[in-house]
Image (spheres, rainbow, N blue to C red):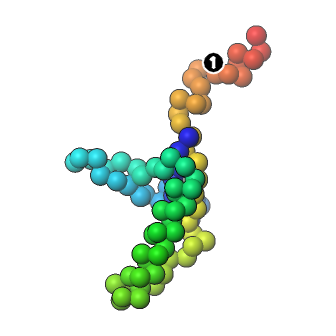
Amino acid sequence: MSYKIEARYTYGWDDAGWSESSGSRWKPLRFPTRAAAEEALREYFEAVKKAVAAGSMDREECVADFRVAEVRDRSARGGAGGEKENEKE
């Protein structure tokens, strides 16, 4: 399992869109542990605070508008005739 950063939008919580470069392609940024994702959020808010103090940003982001969420691996969901169907046999 991996973790991602979500942001609160007008329609609800969704992936914050953080990404990393993989050559010429961009891929969603995922973290191996909840602690690693939480540390990335802390670092982000520290950088924002410094940018506001330096005058590079108008205002700070609201901590309550971000959270760490689990990313469920598609292979763990099971395919057609998943685990529940097998339990009936």
The image quarter in which residue 48 lies: bottom left
- 87 horizontally vs 74: left or right: right
- 42 w.r.t. 18: above or below: below
Q: How many marks?
A: 1
Residue 2: tell me if it is visible. yes
Q: Nearer the viewer, residue 82 or 24?
A: 24
Q: Residue at x 57, y 56 (%)?
A: 35
Q: Residue at x 36, y 48 (%)?
A: 27
**The C terminus is located in which quarter?**
top right
- 22 w.r.t. 41: above or below: above
The secondary structure type at the circle numbered 1 is loop
- 57 horizontally vs 33: left or right: left
- Disc 1 packing (10 Å; few <14; some 14–19; many ≥20): few
Q: Residue at x 59, y 20 (%)?
A: 80
- 75 horizontally vs 28: left or right: right
Question: Residue 69, percent across and down?
Answer: 58, 53
Give the amino acid at mark 1: Gly
Which residue in the structure is indicated by mark 1? Answer: 81
**The N terminus is located in which quarter?**
top right
- 46 w.r.t. 1: above or below: below
Question: Residue 14, percent across and down?
Answer: 53, 56
Q: Residue at x 59, y 25 (%)?
A: 78
Question: Residue 44, percent across and down?
Answer: 45, 69
Q: Nearer the viewer, residue 42 or 78?
A: 42
Q: Nearer the viewer, residue 71 or 89?
A: 71
